[in-house]
Amino acid sequence: MPAYPKPSKRRKSSPAAKKTLLAELTNRDGHVCAWTGIDDDTLVPQHRSGRGMGGDRSKNRLANLVWLKSSINSLIEDDPWWAEEARRRGIKISLHADPTLTPIVHAVHGTVILSDDGSIAPQLDGYTPTEPF
C-alpha cells in the first residue's frame, strides 16, 4: 500500500479576524460594489491582488479588499475586456503590487489610495472609466 503524505497542519485565519476585516471593509465602503456603487445581495469580498493557490494570509488586509458583485468578478476572470478594465480601475492588481500604493477607481470614493487603517487618500490624476458598468 503506498504511503500518502499526511495533511499539513497549516494554521488557518481565525473566523473572528475575518469578521473584523469584513466589518472594517463595510465601515469603509458601505455594503456596495466597488465597480457599480450598488448594494446587492451577491456582493462578495474580493482581493485586489490575488491570493493564489493555498492562500497568502498577508493579502488579507483592508487595502487589498473591495466588495464586488460576483457576476462582475466572473466577467473579470473570463473576459479580456473586463479583465483589462479591472486592471485600469485598480480593482485587480498584480500579485506583487502593494495595494497601499496602487490607486483604485472606486464607485464610492472616486480615484483613491486605500490604506490598511481604513483611511482613503484622493488621487487627482486617476483613470476615469469610459463605461459606467
Image (spheres, grey):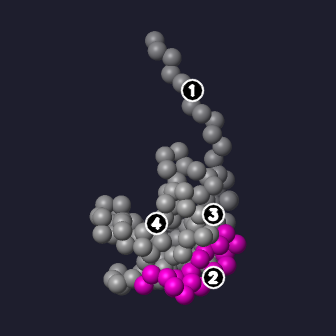
The quadrant of the image that shows the C terminus is bottom left
User: Could you tell me which residue is drawn at 50 percent across and 22 percent down?
Assistant: 4
Distance between mark 1 and mark 3 Cα atoms: 30 Å
Across and down, in percent, residue 49 comes to: 51, 61
The magenta segment: 108-128
Across and down, in percent, residue 130 comes to: 34, 84
Furthest residue in direction top, as rendered: 1
Q: Identify residue type, mark 2.
A: Ala
* Residue bearing mark 1: 6
* Residue bearing mark 3: 61
Distance between mark 3 and mark 4 Cα atoms: 15 Å
Q: Kindly indicate the quadrant of the structure image that contains residue 114.
A: bottom right
* Residue bearing mark 4: 92
| Dot label at residue 121 | 2
For marks 1 and 2 on the same chain, the one whose residue lies earlier in the sequence = 1
Can residue 69 be seen? Answer: no
Distance between mark 1 and mark 4 Cα atoms: 35 Å
Q: Is residue 74 above or below residue 4?
A: below
For marks 2 and 4 on the same chain, the one whose residue lies earlier in the sequence = 4
Q: Kindly indicate the quadrant of the structure image that contains residue 11.
A: top right
User: Could you tell me which residue is drawn at 45 percent across and 81 percent down?
Assistant: 127
For marks 1 and 3 on the same chain, the one whose residue lies earlier in the sequence = 1
What secondary structure is marked by label 3?
loop
Q: Identify residue type, mark 4.
A: Lys
User: Could you tell me which residue is drawn at 31 percent across and 60 percent down?
Assistant: 78
Q: Identify residue type, mark 1.
A: Lys
